[in-house]
């Protein structure tokens, strides 16, 4: 057929290519909104209205009543509450890719999975080598994360200068990276769990499974159970956003009682996550006051250098070296059109670790000045990774165009 092989009335383009293209378009626009929100936060925090910025996000808000009330400042309501929706959407994307997408086949998933592992282990090792142990060493998870919105958005801006397979490869690496980051947050950046509350969260998840087995296809009962699971998880000491992850992974990836539940949820929640929740997170967390002595302190801070070097050098070398080794050992195959020079550029872009890196920084440290230093490291490493990735891929694109011109002349 001209438009792809059909299976069950749905073409390959409709079932795989178009969803990926829609995702990339949304991530591109979402990345621009995210960048704008981060810049607004930085300008606001360094303006004459900086006191208002701090007062706003430190203002406390209580939801619920009596012994069931949860009291947090606005920043933590964004980080612990709204970001649960972000991680729920991430989990939906992970589930879709593992069941029906690029990661469903072991051979296709092997290379990005190995590359992502390389892009996690080396950044952590470099961070610990530079920072050492002690209190600041607890932030080792900060440089291991890749920001999908920024990284894929930057890649999309390059347009036809980058092979189409590069986008799929970067997206696959970032998704595996998210799986690892979620596991790290759950295990290493949560408090010692309180057994009864954890059991209550587990009971809520079992209720959701029972509803699914009973054929309940309406979304709102699951939303009610999800709020209860979030509350129990929050009270248990495990980071509350993990509730969103688990609920997302429980969502059926294939049609359920004639309804594409996962697809419907993604279509509804992805825009809200990309255009409201994540930019609001950036607005609440990217406002670092760079006035005074903090920049001179940052220049000599092992924490800043550990995060920045981990993101830039660790991600670039870790992903590239593992990818090249895996392909040479025939453990996986690169997507069509990708050469070694493209791998270097893709790996550099994976060092853009903005959203999840800032999230982990807030979990790893209590002292505000230490959190600010970690954030400066995230800004520096992400910016350098983005610039170097763009340079590499732009040069690679020009070589590709020259090669095409030579072929045309022949």
Image: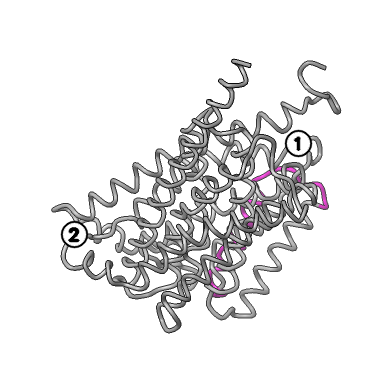
51 above or below 3? below
326 or 20: nearer the viewer: 326
Q: In this view, does 322 lie to the left or right of 211?
A: left
**What's the magenta bit mostly, secondary-structure-wise?**
helix
Instruction: Bin the neighbour count of mark 2 within 10 Å (Cα to Cα): few under 14, some 14-19, many 20 and up.
Output: few
Disc sitting over residue 51 in the figure: 2
Quadrant location of the N terminus in the rendered image: top right
For mark 1, give the secondary structure: loop
Magenta residue check for 362: no
Residue 375 against residue 219 in the figure, above or below: below
Question: Of tags 2 and 1, which is closer to the observer?
Answer: 2
Which is nearer the eye, 271 or 373? 373
347 or 41, nearer to the observer: 347
- Which residue: 55% across, 61% down? 241
Residues at marks 2 and 1, CA–CA distance in whole angstroms: 49 Å
Residue under pointer 1: 259
Residue lying farthest bottom?
Answer: 134
User: Which quadrant of the view contains residue 299?
Assistant: bottom left
Q: Does the magenta stretch include residue 235?
A: yes
Which percent across, then down, holds residue 381?
A: 40, 57
**Residue 272 position (above or below residue 372):** above
Q: Nearer the viewer, residue 283 or 84?
A: 283
Q: Residue furthest right?
A: 8
Q: Residues within 10 Å of mark 1 (few under 14, many from 20)?
A: few
- Image coords of residue 352 (percent x, y): 46, 52
**Coordinates of residue 192 in the picture (x, y in percent):** 56, 81
Q: Give the range drawn in magenta.
A: 213-237
Mark 2 / mark 1, whichever is N-terminal: 2
Residue drawn at (23%, 64%), measured in percent from left and top? 295
Quadrant for the C terminus in the image: top right
Residue 139 drawn at (x, y percent): 45, 72
């Amino acid at each position: 057929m001209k438009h792809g092989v059909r299976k069950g009335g749905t073409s390959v383009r409709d079932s795989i290519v178009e969803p990926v293209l829609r995702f990339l378009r949304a991530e591109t626009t979402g990345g621009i909104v995210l960048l704008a929100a981060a810049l607004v936060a930085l300008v606001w925090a360094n303006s004459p209205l900086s006191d208002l910025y701090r007062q706003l996000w430190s203002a406390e808000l209580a939801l619920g009543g009596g012994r069931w009330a949860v009291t947090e400042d606005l920043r933590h309501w964004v980080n612990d509450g709204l970001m649960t929706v972000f991680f729920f959407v991430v989990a939906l994307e992970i589930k879709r890719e593992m069941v029906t997408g690029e990661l469903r086949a072991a051979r296709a998933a092997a290379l990005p999975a190995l590359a992502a592992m390389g892009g996690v282990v080396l950044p952590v090792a470099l961070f610990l080598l530079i920072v050492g142990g002690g209190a600041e060493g607890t932030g080792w998870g900060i440089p291991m994360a890749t920001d999908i919105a920024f990284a894929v958005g930057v890649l999309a801006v390059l347009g036809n200068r980058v092979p189409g397979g590069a986008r799929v490869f970067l997206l696959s690496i970032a998704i595996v990276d998210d799986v690892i980051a979620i596991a790290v947050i759950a295990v290493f950046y949560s408090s010692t769990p309180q057994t009864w509350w954890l059991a209550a969260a587990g009971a809520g998840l079992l209720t959701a499974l029972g509803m699914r087995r009973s054929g309940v296809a309406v979304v709102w009962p699951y939303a009610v159970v999800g709020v209860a699971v979030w509350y129990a998880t929050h009270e248990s000491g495990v980071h509350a956003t993990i509730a969103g992850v688990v609920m997302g992974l429980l969502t059926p990836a294939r049609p359920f009682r004639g309804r594409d539940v996962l697809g419907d949820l993604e279509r509804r929640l992805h825009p809200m996550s990309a255009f409201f929740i994540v930019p609001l997170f950036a607005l609440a967390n990217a406002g670092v006051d760079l006035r005074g002595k903090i920049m001179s302190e940052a220049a000599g801070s092992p924490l800043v250098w550990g995060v920045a070097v981990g993101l830039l050098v660790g991600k670039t070398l870790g992903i590239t070296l593992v990818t090249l080794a895996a392909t040479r050992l025939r453990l996986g195959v690169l997507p069509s059109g990708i050469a070694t020079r493209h791998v270097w550029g893709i790996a550099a872009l994976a060092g853009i670790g903005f959203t999840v890196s800032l999230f982990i920084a807030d979990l790893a440290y209590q002292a505000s000045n230490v959190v600010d230093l970690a954030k400066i490291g995230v800004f520096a490493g992400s910016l350098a990774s983005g610039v170097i990735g763009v340079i590499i891929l732009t040069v690679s694109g020009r070589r590709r165009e020259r090669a095409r011109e030579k072929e045309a002349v022949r």
